[in-house]
Amino acid sequence: MAAFATLHVAAAPQAVAPDGSEVRVLLALPQAGSMIQFELPPGAVSAAVRHRTVQEIWFVVAGSGQLWRRQDQREQTLDLEPGLCLTIPVGTEFQFRASPAARLVVLAVTMPPWPGEGEAVQVAGPWPATARA
């Protein structure tokens, strides 16, 4: 059984994700999932990636932008705004960008927990990336 865990989010980013977004690491449950907060500065564009083994649920907390995602023959671009919740199934190619007006802030749950280096594979996306891992 996992021990209780409690955490206040860090004031500054603790890592940079493979897509170039700034990451604040939150909590994880072994064998179940992990949670992070990630952000892109105004006008920034992530690198396009695909996850090898994890799936994610995103919840947009602040800012706005767009998300492109493609899975097999399905492809879509969504407007991101506070209150929107979405999924990134395993193997989905995706890329996101923040609007020029504000920082984009998203909470994400990764299942199973993020395994580390090599999980994200860069792919071709619709926009030139400006954020760097």
Image: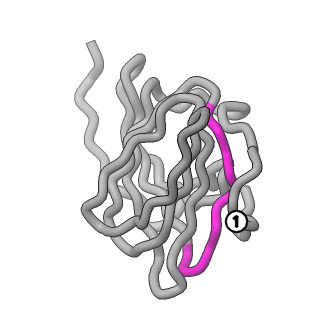
Count of numbered circles in the view: 1
Residue closest to the far bottom: 101
**Residue 26 visible from this viewpoint:** no
Name the residue tied to disc 1: 127
Identify which residue is drawn at 46% across, 48% down: 25
Q: Quadrant of the N terminus?
A: top left
Identify which residue is drawn at 53% across, 55% down: 23
Q: Main secondary structure of the magenta part?
A: loop
**Residue 133 visible from this viewpoint:** yes
Left or right of 127 in this view: 66: left
- Is the residue 42 above or below the residue 87 in the image? below
How is the structure coloured here?
one colour
> Is residue 42 located in the magenta-colored stretch of the structure?
yes
Residue closest to the far top: 1
Span colored in magenta: 41-51
Q: Check disc 1 and give the amino acid type.
A: Trp
- Is the residue 30 above or below the residue 63 in the image? above
Give the quarter of the image for residue 47: bottom right
Give the quarter of the image for residue 111: top left
The image position of residue 36, as x and y in percent, is 43, 47
Q: Quadrant of the C terminus?
A: bottom right
Q: Nearer the viewer, residue 58 or 67?
A: 67
The image position of residue 28, as x and y in percent, is 38, 32
Say which element carries label 1.
Answer: loop
The image position of residue 54, as x and y in percent, is 52, 28
The image position of residue 79, as x and y in percent, is 42, 66
Identify which residue is drawn at 48% across, 57% down: 38
> Is residue 103 located in the magenta-colored stretch of the structure?
no
Residue closest to the far front: 73
Identify which residue is drawn at 53% across, 29% down: 90
Give the quarter of the image for residue 61: bottom left
